[in-house]
Amino acid sequence: MHPVDEIVYDRVSMQYDTGTQALEDIVLSVRTGEFVAIVGPSGCGKSTLLRLAARLERPTSGYVEIGSSSVGFVFQEPTLMPWASVARNVSVLVDLARLPSGERNSRTREAIASVGLADFSDQLPSSLSGGMRMRTSLARALALRPDVLLLDEPFGALDALTREDIQMLLLNLYDREGFTALFVTHSVDEAVLLADRVVVMSPRPGRIKAIVDINLARPRTRELRFEPEYVSLVAMIADTMRGTS
């Protein structure tokens, strides 16, 4: 692993016990502090790449190396405990870290405030909107103060306006905290808005079809979507996914 690489996939292949070949010969390095998005058709192994980085699965061949033990994971669904408050849901992973109680409490409060839910810390998930539940899930991961944040299509179920708001929130958090991010999405538009590079996957078995540099200045705003360079990148990546470029 090069000192500036945070996540390395070296000739990684993944075959499940059912015989399904999810990934084939993946070679990818994610640099420290970089935001990388992964796009591709359903079933191409995007989520498997995240699960391998999180040590939730092991590759059939090759290896995955991650340079930090501090890793946060944001899943497709918020996966909140329905009987627990926002504060309790956010603190659950911090409590497992065996930190002093004062630090656990301060990390929980700071994470909740960072996603705009300071006034809702005592609320149950059932009283929250979909966007607020996802903010809670994001705060839970951030409370660990991770060096690496893995996000598996976290905004896919949100309505368009809420999704845009949380995209802006994530961009602000990324600019402020400087974590390394690996983000899976079906949305090319979202990938270009968020990422420094976009990895385009082929249909199963998942291979890397292309890696596209997104040389758009940060910080990024909602208005970026109207810029010609942004529109051109979205179109080019979409064409690559369709196999027309």
Image: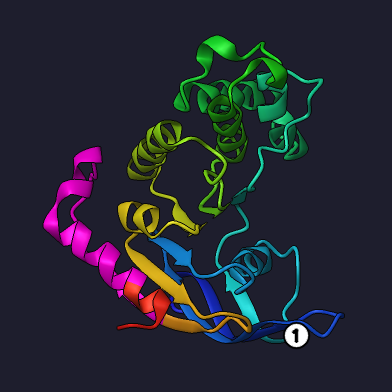
Residue 48, above or below 59:
above
Quadrant for residue 60, please give it. Answer: bottom right
In the rendered image, the quadrant that contains the C terminus is bottom left
Tell me where the magenta segment starts and ends, as one range: 210-238
Neighbour tally class for label 1: few under 14, some 14-19, many 20 plus, Cα within 10 Å:
some
Q: Residue at x 43, y 56 (%)?
A: 187
Q: Secondary structure at mark 1?
A: loop
Residue 214 visible in the snapshot: no
- Position of 27 compared to 49: left or right? left
Along the line of sight, which residue is nearer the eye, 63 or 82? 82
Quadrant for residue 221, please give it. Answer: top left
Q: Residue at x 53, y 10 (%)?
A: 119
Residue 123, x across and y down, in percent: 67, 12
Magenta stretch holds residue 231: yes
Along the line of sight, which residue is nearer the eye, 165 or 220? 165
Residue 94, x across and y down, in percent: 69, 35
Residue 144, above or below 234:
above
- Position of 108 compared to 188: left or right? right
Q: Residue at x 71, y 27 (%)?
A: 89
Residue 48, x across and y down, in percent: 66, 68
